[in-house]
Structure formats: structure tokens, C-alpha cells
Image: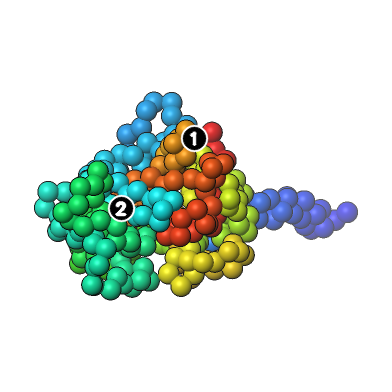
């Protein structure tokens, strides 16, 4: 073999492995893109303290309880008799709620038009009637989110999807913040893109679970009736879709929904305690009566037609 041919042969032997290896190295250095586009979060150095050694599920619950405490510990009671009563909590400087009366002449806006993610309560008591848990309504522009402190708290949640609403925007329906509240909790609990994807609407992460989009999903979808467990997300459609019965109809980013994080289940009292954002203009704990089998279902009360449970798969 002549020297030029020998030299060319050696070059090919060396170059070919390099050509084959280079694409492998290039792909190895690139992160796998998430199953759906993710907004770039704003810079955030806040660390929410949880107990040392807490599991991801426990962290979610602890973070949700911490946020509820920061918002003033507002409680909403959802009864089998279709009552939906706001009691306690709030900030000293927040606009006053309005007492409900049985003959309330003011027509209540639908929750499609309201900034809250939850239905407005039915009138059940007069201001003068003695009641252990008087019922209030917090229309748009009132409640905890209308205070300076509430604005600061809610802005933190929107930052997880790269948004910076004004304090005035936060009191309007266009900037309902319950989905980013859940997204913020999941990121603060340490969940990554292959476990949970953030979103400005609940329907996005509900359909992620329904369609099995994630490699290591933190949640899987289960239809109701079902027994809720601490760490689960309980979800309902709302507005014009509130009577939806088939999860297959949910459209990511389009179906209006609300989800709460379950923090406690009391089988003796037949109650589930859950925390959600933008519930009667605050981060509230809802205490919901379950059916006799301790299941959450769409028909035990008519104000909350719970459609699905996102079952927590994490320890």
C-alpha cells in the first residue's frame, strides 16, 4: 500500500469513531424537553421550611398548611345540605365580606364571572340569627387578595410561571391564581418536570395525568366516587362545565377547573380537609362532608361536583 493510501486509511479509522461518538455526546448534554412547554419562572430564592426528613407528600401538605396560615386561616364549610359557608380567618385590613340572608335581593354572579375559583355560597342565615358558623360572601375586589399582604403572597405564585400581575389584576377573574398556587406548592416540595408540570390552569396538569404524559408522574387520575387521601389533589370543573361527567372531555388550558390539595381525612366525621388558592378570595381550608362510604363524589352536595382525584403516587 502506498503512503498516501495508508495515511488516508488511518485518517478514516480515527475520524469515523469521532463522527459516531459526537452525536451521542451532544444528545447526552441536552436535557429532555418537558412533555408540554414550561414558562420560565422568575428568579426566586425563597425556601419554605419543612420538617427534616419529610417525604415529598408530607412537604406538599406542610407547605399548603404554611400558606393557609400566612393567609389568615380562612375556613370554608361545604355541607351535605348544600351549604357553603366562609367562617373566620382573614387580615385586619381586608375589605369586609357580606352576610348572606335568605331573601338576599342581590343576584349572585356565576363563578364564570367571578374572580374566585369556587361557587358562591347559598343564603342560609340572617345576620341577626344565632349561628355557630355565620356565612359570608367575598365578592371580587374583596377578601384577603385585596390587601397589600395578600397581593405580595399571590404574586409569588404567579412568578412560578413567569408572570407579574398588578395588585389590581389579582382581584379580577382574568388572574385567578388557584392553579399557580398548586404549581408553586409542587415546585417548593421539590417536584421536577418529569413528575409535575406547572401551569396557569388546573386543566393542564389534570390532562397531563389523564394522558400519561410524564415519565415519573407524581399523580394519576382516578374518577370519583373515590376515597381521598392526604396528598391527593381533588378537582372539579366549574362555570359552564361544572356538571361535566366524563374526564375525557377536559381540554388542557381551556376547561375551567379548580383543584385543592388534601391535607387531612377524618373518616369518623365523614370529612375531608383540603387547601386551595383563590377560594373566596384567599388561600382557604375547605372542610367538605363526604358520603357514607367516606368517598368524594359529584352528587353528595350540589355546590361542588367533584369530578376526579389526582392520586398521589409519592411517598
**Coloured how?**
rainbow
Q: Residue 315 appears in which quarter of the rendering? A: top right
Per the image, label 1 sits on a secondary structure element best described as loop
Question: Are there few (<14), some (14-19), or many (20+) residues within 10 Å of tag 1?
Answer: some
* Camera-side residue of 291 and 55: 291
* Camera-side residue of 7 and 215: 215
Per the image, label 2 sits on a secondary structure element best described as strand
Q: Earlier in the sequence, mark 1 or mark 2?
A: 2
In the rendered structure, find residue 313 and report the number of the disc placed on it: none
Percent x, y of residue 46: 29, 43
Q: Is residue 95 visible?
A: yes
* Camera-side residue of 148 and 108: 108
Q: Is residue 192 visible?
A: no
Residue at the location (39% across, 26% down)? Answer: 52
For disc 1, the marked residue is 267
Percent x, y of residue 102: 27, 63
For residue 171, side relative to residue 288 (left or right): left
Q: Residue 95 appears in which quarter of the rendering? A: bottom left
Mark 1 and 2 residues: CB-CB less than 8 Å, in contact? no
For disc 2, the marked residue is 85
Amino acid at each position: 500500500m502506498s503512503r498516501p493510501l495508508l495515511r488516508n486509511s488511518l485518517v478514516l479509522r480515527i475520524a469515523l469513531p469521532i463522527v459516531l461518538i459526537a452525536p451521542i455526546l451532544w444528545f447526552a448534554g441536552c436535557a429532555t424537553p418537558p412533555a408540554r412547554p414550561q414558562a420560565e419562572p422568575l428568579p426566586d430564592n425563597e425556601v419554605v421550611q419543612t420538617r427534616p426528613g419529610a417525604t415529598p407528600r408530607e412537604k406538599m401538605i406542610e407547605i399548603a398548611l404554611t400558606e393557609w396560615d400566612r393567609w389568615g386561616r380562612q375556613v370554608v364549610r361545604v355541607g351535605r345540605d348544600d351549604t357553603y359557608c366562609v367562617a373566620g380567618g382573614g387580615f385586619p385590613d381586608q375589605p369586609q365580606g357580606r352576610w348572606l340572608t335568605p331573601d338576599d335581593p342581590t343576584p349572585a354572579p356565576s363563578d364564570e364571572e367571578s374572580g374566585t375559583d369556587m361557587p358562591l355560597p347559598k343564603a342560609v342565615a340572617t345576620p341577626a340569627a344565632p349561628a355557630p358558623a355565620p356565612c359570608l360572601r367575598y365578592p371580587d375586589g374583596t377578601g384577603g387578595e385585596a390587601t397589600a399582604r395578600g397581593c405580595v403572597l399571590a404574586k409569588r405564585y404567579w412568578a412560578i410561571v413567569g408572570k407579574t400581575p398588578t395588585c389590581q389584576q389579582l382581584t379580577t377573574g382574568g388572574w385567578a391564581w388557584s392553579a399557580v398556587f398548586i404549581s408553586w406548592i409542587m415546585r417548593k416540595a421539590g417536584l421536577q418536570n418529569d413528575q409535575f408540570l406547572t401551569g396557569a390552569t388546573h386543566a393542564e396538569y389534570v390532562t397531563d395525568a389523564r394522558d400519561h404524559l410524564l415519565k415519573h408522574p407524581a399523580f394519576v387520575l382516578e374518577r370519583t366516587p373515590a376515597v381521598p387521601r392526604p396528598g391527593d389533589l381533588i378537582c372539579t370543573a366549574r362555570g359552564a362545565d361544572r356538571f361535566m361527567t366524563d374526564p375525557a372531555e377536559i381540554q388542557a388550558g381551556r376547561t375551567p377547573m379548580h383543584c385543592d390539595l388534601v391535607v387531612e381525612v377524618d373518616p369518623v366525621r365523614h370529612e375531608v380537609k383540603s387547601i386551595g388558592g383563590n377560594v373566596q378570595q384567599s388561600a382557604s381550608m375547605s372542610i367538605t362532608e363526604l358520603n357514607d362510604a367516606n368517598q368524594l363524589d359529584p352528587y353528595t352536595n350540589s355546590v361542588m361536583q367533584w369530578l376526579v382525584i389526582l392520586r398521589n403516587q409519592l411517598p
